[in-house]
Image (cartoon, helix red, strand yellow):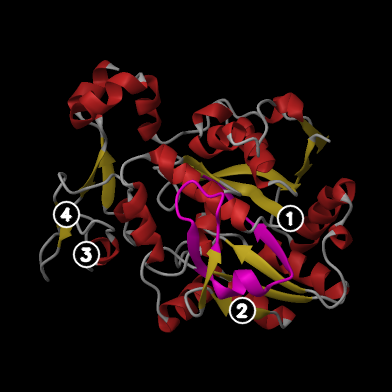
């Protein structure tokens, strides 16, 4: 049986339009009732990277979350929404994030329960995993009968594209994410394997992608919103990402998670392997979609990359004009490569830096940028 992905047009976040698009997208997949039964505890995994307003296109839009929550309630099931945001998170910061992203208002209007992934945790065995054989994930993930993920279609400095698979990094509570980044170090292929280990440990039963307004450029937080006008759905995260990356103008096999999924036989090798319902993919492809410039390293043969990495690798840098010296970059740096003294702009030790770009991803002011070395101009 081929992978199945549904692609439906949806031009605005009008609640009625979003609800219609979700229903239309799920119909050929068997409808929501094919995965949700009366009495089920349904965890809706959101993308809540940072405390940004919905129009910034950083997080899952509350209109999509509201549509799914209401549909679950109508089936007699019990919806819960949550995530583990990037970096350090406290109860107070999580509440502020929920308010800023519009998720708290959505929960108040629907009566939906909010869970915090950074609370209780559970260890699960993952004997077939290629990274950790035991994974520490949020207990809420292990307790739900059904998981529905609502990824945002965005670029990503490290993994180039972030969608249904990458968002599962939010299964990891709090600073566990930093520990796991250290394990994969500078190897983006190994990091992709870790993401797929999380995926195989607890696959979402259904994923519905918010691609009404996505993000291009320096994602996942500091890129530019890009109107795409789509809602996409699948019971396969890897197939959903393949279609979404194709629409964004990527060669899907240039995206580490997509390539590794194919090699592990848990993802498609070609668009022909996917049964696409609704819109045809080819006319939707965005030819001028801005990709992260870190993708240029893909053009260097692997046997040369290790020896040349010192001269051609991107590196995070801090713009003193934008930095408000909050110290978040230093606190959230997995290898502790950033030195922060109160009242001064932080400094980065690039010899310690593992190029995970967490500092760039999590800086609330967008003061961290990724610099290309001179040698890259020759590539």
Marks 3 & 4, CB-CB < 8 Å contact: no
Name the residue nearer the viewer: 155 or 194: 194
Residue found 31% across the figure and 42% down from its top: 186
Q: Position of residue 46 (x, y in %)?
A: 60, 63
In what element is the residue under mark 3?
A: loop
Image point (12%, 71%), residue name: 342
Alpha-carbon span between mark 4 and mark 2? 37 Å
Give the residue furthest to the front.
Answer: 127
Residue numbers of the magenta segment = 125-154
Q: Are marks 2 and 3 in contact (CB under 8 Å)?
A: no
Q: Are marks 2 and 1 in contact (CB under 8 Å)?
A: no
Mark 2 = which residue? Answer: 114
The disc, 4 or 1, on the residue closer to the chain's N-terminal end is: 1
Q: Which residue is mark 4?
A: 320
Q: Quadrant of residue 323?
A: bottom left
Which quadrant of the figure has residue 322?
Answer: bottom left
Residue at (43%, 53%) from the top-left corner? Answer: 221
3D distance between C-alphas at marks 3 and 1:
40 Å
């Amino acid at each position: 049986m081929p992978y199945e992905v549904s692609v439906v047009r949806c031009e605005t976040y009008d609640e009625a339009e979003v609800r219609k698009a979700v229903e239309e997208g799920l119909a050929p997949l068997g409808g929501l009732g094919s995965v949700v039964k009366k009495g089920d505890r349904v965890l809706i995994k959101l993308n809540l990277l940072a405390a940004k307003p919905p129009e910034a296109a950083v997080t899952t839009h509350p209109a999509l979350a509201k549509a799914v929550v209401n549909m679950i309630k109508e089936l007699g099931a019990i919806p819960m929404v949550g995530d583990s945001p990037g970096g350090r998170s406290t109860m107070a910061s999580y509440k502020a994030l929920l308010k800023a992203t519009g998720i708290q208002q959505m929960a108040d209007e629907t009566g939906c329960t909010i869970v915090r992934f950074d609370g209780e945790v559970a260890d699960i065995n993952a004997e077939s995993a290629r990274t950790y054989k035991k994974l520490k994930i949020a207990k809420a993930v292990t307790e739900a009968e059904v998981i529905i993920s609502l990824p945002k279609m965005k670029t990503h400095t490290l993994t180039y594209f972030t969608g249904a698979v990458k968002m599962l990094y939010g299964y990891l509570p709090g600073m566990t994410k930093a520990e796991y980044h250290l394990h994969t170090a500078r190897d983006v292929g190994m990091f992709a394997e870790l993401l797929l280990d999380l995926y195989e440990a607890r696959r979402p039963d259904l994923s519905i992608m918010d691609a009404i307004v996505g993000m291009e450029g320096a994602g996942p937080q500091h890129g530019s919103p890009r109107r795409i006008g789509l809602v996409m759905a699948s019971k396969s995260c890897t197939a959903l990402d393949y279609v979404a990356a194709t629409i964004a103008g990527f060669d899907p096999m240039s995206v580490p998670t997509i390539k590794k999924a194919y090699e592990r036989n848990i993802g498609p090798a070609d668009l022909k392997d996917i049964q696409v319902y609704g819109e045809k993919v080819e006319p939707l492809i965005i030819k001028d979609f801005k990709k992260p410039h870190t993708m240029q390293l893909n053009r260097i043969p692997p046997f040369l990359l290790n020896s040349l990495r010192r001269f051609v690798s991107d590196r995070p840098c801090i713009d003193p004009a934008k930095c408000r010296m909050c110290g978040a970059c230093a606190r959230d740096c997995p290898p502790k490569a950033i030195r922060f003294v109160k009242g001064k702009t932080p400094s980065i030790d690039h010899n310690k830096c593992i190029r995970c770009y967490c500092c760039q991803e999590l800086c609330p002011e967008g003061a961290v940028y990724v610099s290309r070395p001179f040698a890259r101009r020759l590539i």
